[in-house]
Amino acid sequence: MEKTLSQWLIFGIGFLAQGLFSARILVQWIMSERKKKVVSPTIFWILSLLASYMLFIYGWLRNDFAIMFGQVISYYIYMWNLKIKGVWSMSKDGRLEGSKGNIWWKAPLLTLLLITPLVGIGYILTDLDGFRQQVFQNSNIPLWLVIYGSLGQVIFTLRFIYQFFYSKKRNDSYLPAGFWIISLIGSAVIVSYAIIRLDPVLGLGQATGFISYTRNLMILHKQQI
């Protein structure tokens, strides 16, 4: 019974994370449709950060290296975009500031957000042999499937690396065409991984993005005409 409850709790965290991921895409899509151009709203990055935090925890609890690996890089890119958006920044005397001035609770929150993935990775490194046996020598997850799932996460993460360099060059937050093209490719790989892995959290979460990715490409095409 306890095991069943624990499994439901883990899946609950995963579904909530994917719900937030889906919500960010929906919000971004609606805002882009209203403005007749592809936008990169602050709420998109806030929801992304919250969802990534929870999905990292989900992957940790499921001993799923592919999920954890896919979140770490994009997680910090979400934080960079929020910094560019002015959600937080450092004042000259080293205090954390928000768009409305110094807010006392943002410093501990930012610290928590920054260190959680590092703590998770550090925890893994303290028992690297045990982790390798659980993940890479797990009879429930063949090595080829771990590699395939990780490949999907790498492709999916590349979209935010591309977005980061594209935006950094322009010193603003953008979601260019390349971002959506890479999203479509990575999502297709992850959905197929989820089907093989029998993971409803990944499958449902990724499947909902196909329409939005395609629609954003259509909007960008109209912008360029």
Image (cartoon, rainbow, N blue to C red):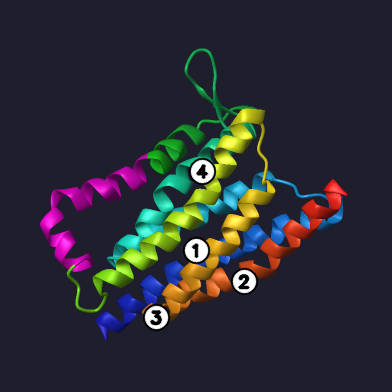
Residue 88, given in percent of the width and then of the height, sits at 57, 31
**Amino acid marked by disc 3:** Ile
Position above or below: 115 against 59: above
Asked if residue 28 can be seen in this view, the reply is yes
Q: Which sits earlier in the primary sequence, circle 2 or circle 3? A: 3
Left/right placement of residue 51 relative to residue 118 reads: right
Check if residue 33 falls in the magenta segment. Answer: no
Tell me what residue is drawn at x 52 percent, y 40 percent: 79
Q: Which of marks 2 and 3 is in front?
A: 3
Q: Report the mark closest to the observer, 1 or 2.
A: 2
From the image, tell me which residue sits under label 3. 196
Say whether residue 152 is left or right of residue 116.
Answer: right
* Label 4 to label 1: alpha-carbon separation: 21 Å
**Residue that badge 4 annotates:** 161
Q: Mark 1 points at which residue?
A: 17
Compare marks 4 and 3 and give the one earlier in the sequence. Answer: 4
As drawn, which residue projects farthest toward the front? 225
Q: Vertical placement of 6 versus 221: above or below?
A: below
Crowding near the residue tagged with mark 4, few <14, some 14–19, many ≥20 C-alpha atoms within 10 Å: some
Mark 2 to mark 3 CA distance (whole Å): 18 Å
Question: What range of the chain is rendered magenta?
Answer: 115-136
* Residue located at (33% from left, 80% from top): 5
> Disc 1 versus disc 2: distance between alpha carbons?
13 Å
The residue pinned by badge 2 equals 208
Q: Single out the mark in the foreground, 4 or 1.
A: 4
**SS for dot 1:** helix
Of the numbered discs 1 and 3, the one sitting upstream in the chain is 1
